[in-house]
Every structure is written in C-alpha cells, then in structure tokens.
Image: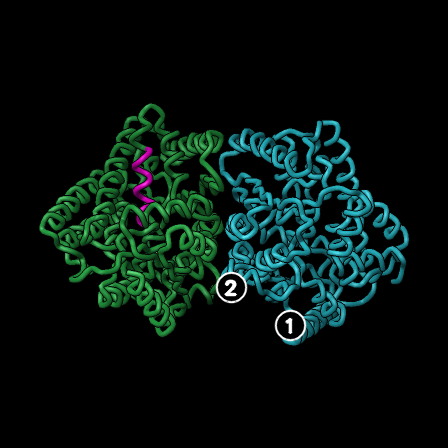
Amino acid sequence: MTKLASTSKMKEIMGTYYLEAKNAAHNGLKVAWVTSGAPVEYLHAVGAIPIYPENYAAMCGASHATAELLRKAESLGYAGELCSYARSDFGAEALQGGPLMGLPRPDFLVCASNICNTVTKWYQVLSRHFQVPLFLVDMPFVHDDISEEMVAYVKGQFAGLEEFLAEIMGRPFDRDRFSEAVLQSARATELWREVLEMGKARPAPLNSFDTFIHLAPIVTLRGTPRAVEYYTALVEELRERVSRGEGSIPNERIRLLWDNLPIWYRIKYLADFLANWGAVPVVATYTNSWALIGDVQLEGRDDLAGALARAYLSPFINRGVRYRIEYLCRMIEEFSLDGFLMHSDRTCKPYSLTQLPVKEEVQRRTGKPGVVLEADKVDETAFVEAAITTRLEAFLESVLCRN
Amino acid sequence: MESKVLDELREAAENPRAEVMKWLRVTGRPVVAVLPAYFPEPLVHAAGAFPVGMWGNTLPLGASDSYLQSFSCSIARSILELALKPESDFIAGFIFTSMCDNFETLAEVFKLALPRKPVFTFVIPNTSHLPSRRPHLERELDRALAFLSRVAGKRPSPEDYARSAKLYGEFVRLVREFYRHRALFPAALSNYDFYAVLKASFFMPKEEFNPRLRSLLEDLDRVGGEGARVLLSGIVPQPLSLLKVFDAAGTRVVGDDFAGAYRLFSKEPAAALLGSEIDKYLLSGAPCSTLHRDGQDRGKYLAARVRELGADGFVNWHIKFCEPEAFDRPHLLDELRRQGIPTLVLEVETSSRNFDALRTRLEAFVELIRQEKEKGAVS
C-alpha cells in the first residue's frame, strides 16, 4: 500500500463521522440507513444522518471481523449463497459486532436499486427487523442507453422521496439545502475523479488498492464540505507525488485494471503479491462508479433532480454488457494498461455474472489479457490462496511475455 | 387416474421440445420464449406469436459454463444451456423481466452468447412511489410492442389484444378451478400429474390447452384421500420428477406458492392495451419475493393460506442460488413456526436427479405431521 499523508486525515474524518452517527439519537438527529448508490443529497437536505451498512460490511471485512458475523447470520437462517455484505450486516446487527460494535439504529431506510436488486431484499429484511419505514427508489438496470423516460421515472420517485422525507422529519423539504448538498456532492465527485485519473501517470502515484481505502469519504460523506476538503488535500498530495515521479510501487512494469468489488480481507496480500512482479492495478471499475456521479451533476444545474437521476443510473454495475465492454476497452487505452483482473465475487451476481463473456470480448478487441479470480468481497472462505496465486502467476507471465 | 387427455398433457410436460415443435408446425406462429417472470403474455399472443414459458430444465450443463459462473441459479444456467443448442435455433426471440439480478444479467449474457437472437427485458416497477408506475408502464408497453412487432412481424391492435386477453382470462379461470378442485379432492390426481398438467401449459398454445384442461376437469374424481396435506412454496417446481417423491412419501400437495405456478396464475391478465391495465395485472394476485410492495408480509400471507387450504405443513422448495427466495426464507419460516405450522426446507438444482436424502427428510416430515395430527385428535 502506498504511504500517503492523507491516510491519517481520512481515518480521523471517518472516525468523527461514525462517532457523530453513534451519538445522533442523543443529539436529537434522525439516522437513515442507505445503500451506497442512494441519492444521499436528499438526506443531507433534511439534516438526517446517512449510515451505509455496505461501508460497514467492508470495514468488517478489511479488519477480519466478518467470519463471526457470517456465522451468526447463518444461524438466523441467511444462506451462504446470499450477498456477504448483507449477511455481515445482519450478523453485526444481531451481535452488535464489528470494529464499531454495531451501527446506530435507523429511524428510517432509503434503498436505491441502482447497484442491484439484492439491496431491495436486504432492506425489506431491515424494515421488518427495525419496524421502520422504507422508501425504495427504483432505478432500473440500464440494458442499453439511459433514456429520457427512465430519467423521468426516477425523477418521479425523487419527488416521492421528498414527500416521504418531509413527513418523517415533520417539516417541509428544504430546496436551498438540497442545492447546496448537490453542489458539495458534485465538487467532491469531481475531485474524486481527479484522484482516480492520477492513475494515468507513469508511474502511477497511487494504485487501485489505495483507492479502495480512500473511497470511504466519497461513499459516506459526499454532499458535505468534509469530503470536498479531504479530496482537495489528497489531490494536492498526489500532484506532488506525480511531479516527483514517485510511483506507488518501486518498479512499475505491468499496469492493470481491477474489475468488481475489492477482496477486502486480502488487499495488502494482493498488493504485495503483485508489487513483487512489478504489477499494479491503476484503475478500477468499482471506484470509478462514484466519479461518474460528478460528471452529470455539474451539467445539470437547471434540473438538479434530472441530473441526479441520470448520474445515479450511470454506475458500471447498473450497465449492460455493451457499455461494460466499451468502458473496459477505453480504460485499457486511456490508462495504458497491459491487462485486466476480474474479481468474480461469488455473492455479487450483477457485477460478476457478465464477466466471462465480457472478458473474452475485451481480450479480442484490445489484445490485452484478462484473468478471473474466484473469491468473495468479505467472505474469506471463498478465497483459495493456492488457486489465486497459480492463476495470477500464469497471467503475469503471459503479460510479461507479450510485453 | 388415467385418461387420454392426461396422457397427452403429461407427455407435453415431459417432452417440451417435441410439443413446441408440433404446435409450431400446426400454427406456423413464431415461437417466443417467455422467461421468468410476469411478462404480460397475452401481448405475445396478440402479436401473432406462440409464447412458450421457459422456467429451466434438467439438461446437464456444458456450453453454458463458459458464460455463467457456478453461483448463477440453475434455472438461468439451464435456460442458457438449452438456448445455446443448435436445435433451439427455431426460437425467434427471448423475453426477460427485471425480476432479479440473475435474470437481468442473463439477458445481457444472451446478447454476447447468442448475438443474432433478439432479446427484450421488460422492466417491472418496484418503487415505493406509486404514481411513478403508470407512465413508466406506458413506456414499457410501447417498448414491448415494438419488440414484438419486430420478432412476430405484427404490432397488435387493441382488438387483437382484447381477443388474446379473453383467451388468457379463460385460461387462468380454468387453472384456478383446477387448483380449487385440488384443494378439495387432492386424491383425484397424483402430485406429479397435477404439476405436469400445469407445466404443459407452458408448451401449448392456450387455444389447445384450455379445452384439454376443461375436459380433464370434467373427468376428475371427487376424492379426498388420506395423507399429509402440504403447501409448497418456491420459485418453480423443478425438477418435476421430485413430485414423484412427494407422491411416494404420502403427501398431498393441496396448493402452492411457486412464482412459476400459483403466483403466476393468480394474476388477472391485463384487460386492455394500456399501461394502467398492465399495472393492475402486476399488482394483482399473490405476493412474490421478486415484486416489492411496501409493508407486504409474505410470512403472514402464507400462514393464512396454509389455514385456508387446511394444510398440515409447509414445504419450502428452494432452488439453490435463488436470492429473492433465500432472503425471504428466514422470515417465512419464523412466522409459520410461530403460528405452529410444521415446516420443511428442501434444496435442489433444476437438474437434480438423486433425491435419496430429500426422500428421507420428507418421510420424516410426513411422520412428524402424522404425530402432530394424532396429538391434535387426542387433545
């Protein structure tokens, strides 16, 4: 992992965020559990505190706290074939487990289906468990292009979300605060994109494993000045690294793309393994999803809801294979890549189930090799080290031969 | 029971390809595969095509393995396996819905695996904001009609649709009558035959199926019979042969909650070619794990159905890797157990053949029900 001065700052702001969330009820604030792709700007507009169970599940995974949570979820009847984030969340709630000893209880739930249909089922479970209202923002999978009709459909639901929030908070929806939150969100996502584009430099000043860690504020704090402040400093630090020609690994020989969610409990292991080969992922479809949001937000000042709808329909995981193939080919070109890594996440169907034919097609079009690594984002039992290293070695050798 | 009609329907369920080819030859209508779940099928019929239900099969997996990982559900994997076979080339197009992540991505995999085949996904609205649904469904209806006119060569008129809706209205009325008879006289047909008849409806034009089911209904005996009365729930009763194990174990399936059976047939076909009518269709009928409705409680719903049908127990027939069903399961089982209803979970793949372990568990469950009944009779 790259040593960045900003890392300690990030730990500090994330710590503050979770501390405030833990004390929310005590301070008379309402807590909402939301999905990572929810239009959180609406929540900031009403002063509710958004909590991200997905982020917490990732934290539990990175700190090797997941096994116990998954066992608990299984004892509650949640089968091992279900999303391991959801199972971690159920286990953490039942045990008040993980690094933060559980999450603060929600007053209401907002679920957006732009990352999967799984979250719909997950949030139904939460709604029954906590006996709190759930608002489901339905954002259909984009098989072809984002049409005006789809945007109109999502905008209609945003209007419904405003009404839902006004009722829950007991006061009218605040448009000025909403515009401010969208602006903050757009600035932060713009900066986040700058961070990610730094990966184009040779050598890259940071790698995808770093971006998995520095992703936390854009997921949890977008829409607030804190995220803007944080990424402003990170961009600055990275610019200096680029100007000094400092790479994230000593001898960058192989530049790669990472597809799908991180393998949270093996980030350091994989980073070190690849670095030994002079290999480094410099761009990831996963982290890029939060940069797409900024794109459209800045264009749509006159129609914020429409711009947000378009933005939140955009993430890679919500797109069909034609988009995925073109996107991967473009990244390979723009980031001067030698190949691509695909994490086939056993419990994430929408991200993973298109990977096999997409890999073939991207290889055909670009001539760059890809490799599929079978694992799971937080369920460590799915990671078979010998199988992964054998595959990676064969892949890296083939990349070196081509080079 | 034995009858010529029953033999014919059983044959259709057991040899879908031969059945579909037969009707393709007779009607000359292009075959459109309708995948799970809830696409308004009368639209396909109105466009002059022959809609065929595709809910998974028992084929051993081979070619599909290069396209789909093993954690895809076997319904999706086996459908792809079948579609990749050269003998399936007669299928003119495939209709998906947004029911789950597995099928949304399967539609995308089809585009790469079968690039020449037209593929359409109907987006079912799943929102807490009800007014958004209708304009969205107007648009989906329009997209569906455009697809059908491309595949079937005809954009149906409102009159065409009205005729198809009438035919499908008659179809669901007959099927519901079949279910009512089942709940009252479960010994009239074996469990296997009951579901074979329902499955046959996927592979026959409804013009052909309706009179056959009507004639079968007239011939059915009115006998109750002994045995443990159970309600089955799951995504689809596949593999069909597992029902023979239910027969051998002495159960009487008195009703079900399969997405590919009762949930599907409980929906009232849209009365007209309008988004608002499609909306009524989608909102009608039994709750489903794949359709979000605010505040819906499938646990309470199923407990009520168990009581209404006079069932002695509940069996969850789980196709592995079906996420919507697996998410609902803990709640369903908790609620049913809380209400004192015996429950059993059986896990299968669509291609499962060896049922030894399941047979033992089902027999133990039947014994448990028998003991519960005796206790009830004594107290």
What residue is rendered at 56% in x and 63% in y? B320
User: Is residue B373 among the parts visible in the rendering?
Assistant: yes
The chain holding disc 2 is: B
Secondary structure under badge 1? helix
Residue range highlighted in magenta: A287-296
Position of the C terminus of chain B by quadrant: bottom right
Q: Residues within 10 Å of mark 2 (few under 14, many from 20)?
A: few
The type of residue carrying mark 2 is Ser
The residue pinned by badge 2 equals: B70
Q: Position of residue A380 (x, y in %)?
A: 37, 68
> Distance between the Cα atoms at labels 2 and 1?
22 Å
Q: Colour of chain A?
A: green
The chain holding disc 1 is: B
- Prevailing SS of the magenta stretch: helix
User: Is residue A26 among the parts visible in the rendering?
Assistant: no
The type of residue carrying mark 1 is Leu
* Nearer-the-camera pick, B288 or B89: B89
Secondary structure under badge 2? loop
The residue sitting at the left extreme is A244
Q: Colour of chain B?
A: cyan
Position of the N terminus of chain B by quadrant: bottom right
